[in-house]
Amino acid sequence: MNGITKIPLSGRPLVCDADSARGRCRLQEFFAGPENHLVEAAVHAVFDDEPDGYSPLVFYGPTAVGKSHLARGLAAEWRSLNHGSRVEYTAAADFAEEFDEAIETRAVDEFREKYRSLSMFVCEDIELLAGTTLTGTAVQDEFIHTLDALLSSGGRIVVTACSAPHGLSTLLPGLRSRLTSGLTVPLRMPGKEVRLVLLRHLAMVCSIDIIEAALRLLADGLSTTVPELFAVLVHLDESARPTTRGIDAESVRCYLASRNGSRTPALDELAVAAARYFSLKLSELRSQSRRKSVVTARNVAVYMARRLTNTSFQQIGRYFGGRDHTTVMHGYYKLEAMLKVDPAMRGAVEQLQQKWRT
């Protein structure tokens, strides 16, 4: 398929309109092009008969490049192939909270039995293991011992991260060392060839009427993530449906022209927009307030800044009262998770972003 590999692993549902059948889709495969050429070998290594299976396997990269798709898919496939084996899928922040609770309830032995006797352990967003627990570095030490126990027993370990493990300065050196001892795989946004295959596949799965020329124009003009490709395809379908002629090349050209004409907002503009929407003052968002309404509005501003600009978590943290980048990152992922289950919040963010995405 022109250098593109279709790996049969199911990801989480893509959702851009919860009320529309066309607005929901679950990809049952991960499409890997030349830009992600290591992925196929990494997936095969997990199921290899070799004792370590290149464990731990670390997928790293920016948001929405497929880390969760691969992590969830590998966990599901392992369960399917190894009936009765113990598999645990969790987020690093949840692992930390569970460890805190185990200490408070004097159930540390049960906690260790749960995690150290697994045949596969999948942990997402490892960078959030630091700074999310009351027990400081103790949870990282616990994670290190968990990895050592699993490696000695032949268990498989899959981890996702926002950047390469050696660059995660908030993690203990011992943890970084263990994460880099296996196979580390960078994930990048899909290239043009993969975008075309994905768009064609999404159109087929969602019964969206679009001509080949329009698909090629979209693949050429949209250098973005899979969720956004899906959202654009559904948006164009909604716009074309009243005409009953499907999505043609001209409608795609008009959409790309309007999109390319939009400007990148400044961080201050996004913060002001979020503050106004939630009836707050900008000074409150930039303060140290932990009031729920303030935290929510601040997280919305952080989310938009990461999605609409090239501003780093460090820069955002400095703007919002000198916050540590891991704190800001945690707020981003917390809101991202909320958007998947809260239609009202999803609508609020879409409304706020519309000004810069027309």
Image (cartoon, rainbow, N blue to C red):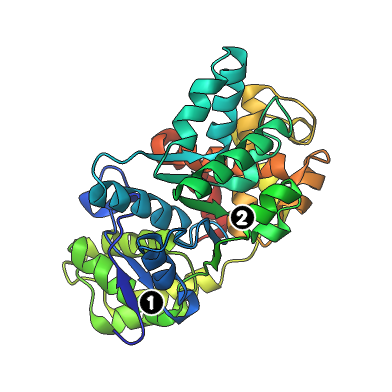
Could you tell me residue 196's position as x and y percent?
34, 78
Identity of the residue furthest to the top in this view: 105
Q: Quadrant of residue 89?
A: top left
Q: Position of 94 compared to 34: left or right?
A: right
Asked if residue 353 can be seen in this view, the reply is yes
**Pointer 1 residue:** 194
Per the image, label 1 sits on a secondary structure element best described as helix
Q: For the N terminus, which image quadrant?
A: bottom left
Q: Amino acid at mark 1?
A: Val
| 131, 347: nearer the viewer | 131
**Pointer 2 residue:** 179
> Residue 221 shows which numbered tag?
none
Asked if residue 274 can be seen in this view, the reply is no
Q: Circle 2: is it few (<14), some (14-19), or many (20+) Cα within 10 Å?
A: many
Mark 1 or mark 2: name the one nearer the start of the chain. 2
Q: Residue at x 60, y 50 (%)?
A: 304
Q: Quadrant of residue 262?
A: bottom right
Could you tell me residue 81's position as x and y percent?
24, 52
Q: Amino acid at mark 2?
A: Leu
Could you tell me residue 299's position as x and y percent?
62, 39
Task: Identify whether 160 is placed above or below 117.
Answer: below
Per the image, label 2 sits on a secondary structure element best described as helix
Task: Identify whether 311 is placed above or below 147.
Answer: below
Q: Residue at x 57, y 12 (%)?
A: 105
Q: Quadrant of residue 291?
A: top right
Q: Residue at x 16, y 67 (%)?
A: 244
The residues tagged by marks 1 and 2 sit, at their Cα atoms, a distance apart of 29 Å
Q: Position of 173 compared to 277: left or right?
A: right
Q: Circle 1: is it few (<14), some (14-19), or many (20+) Cα within 10 Å?
A: many
| 138, 161: nearer the viewer | 138
Could you tell me residue 202's position as x and y percent?
27, 65
